[in-house]
Image (spheres, rainbow, N blue to C red):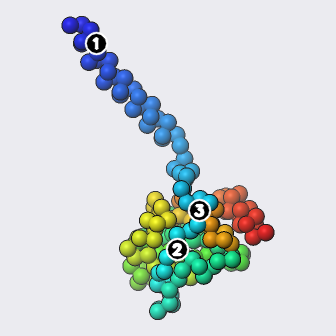
Amino acid sequence: MSKRFNLWFILPLAVFVGLVAFFAVGLQRDPHLVPSPLIDRPAPNFLLPQLEAQGKSFSPATYHGQVWLLNVWASWCVSCREEHPVLLKFSREQHIPLVGLDYKDQAADAQHWLDNYGNPYTLTAVDADGRVGIDYGVYGVPETYIIDKAGIIRYKQIGPITPESLQQVILPLLRELQK
């Protein structure tokens, strides 16, 4: 009887210790380093209406032959406000298209937000139902994708772009891709 008691005691304890170790390792990882299965793959194609230009639409094919950025954002996104000054500065200093993808948002709210905080985007496409975001594997907003001249996704920034990530990762990669 004592062997049975020990087994029933040790087995749940071993499972518990294994789960604690699994979660401890997972909590040590940086959530911004989640790998994207889309890196080095063609950017998903889409056709969405533009926010500022009624009756016009946008497709990634528009920028085929150019390096460009796709920034997924929303007016309800708190972290988007954090990265917004960085994007405004980027759009003033760089000559690279920065396309906004307004994700699961009301167009009027998005336009009001851009009117109040400034508009860093070359254009903004409206992904009201979030389907394009799903195709791009959006975990949450903001997220930014660097797309090369051939339409291949070369980098994915999860979370807000900071001055450090811009200087240390994004700008060097953009310079390399523009060669």
Question: Horizontal and vertical percent for residue 129?
Answer: 38, 73
Q: Residue at x 46, y 59 (%)?
A: 139
Q: Which residue is mark 3?
A: 41
Label total for image: 3
Q: Amino acid at mark 1?
A: Asn
Give above or below for 126 relative to 35: below
Q: Amino acid at mark 2?
A: Asn
Mark sitting on residue 45: 2
Give above or below for 34 relative to 61: above
Q: Which residue is mark 1?
A: 6
Q: Label 2's element?
A: loop
Please state, as top left, top right, bottom left or bottom right, where the C terminus lies in the image.
bottom right
Mark sitting on residue 25: none
Q: Earlier in the sequence, mark 2 or mark 1?
A: 1
Question: Horizontal and vertical percent for residue 30?
Answer: 54, 47
Q: Quadrant of residue 132?
A: bottom left
Residue found at the very far left of the displayed protein: 1
* Discs 3/1, front: 3
Q: Amino acid at mark 3?
A: Arg
Q: Label 3's element?
A: loop
* Discs 2/1, front: 2
Please state, as top left, top right, bottom left or bottom right, where the N terminus lies in the image.
top left
Residue found at the very far right of the displayed protein: 179
Residue found at the very far bottom of the displayed protein: 55
Which residue is nearer to you in this view: 133 or 76?
133
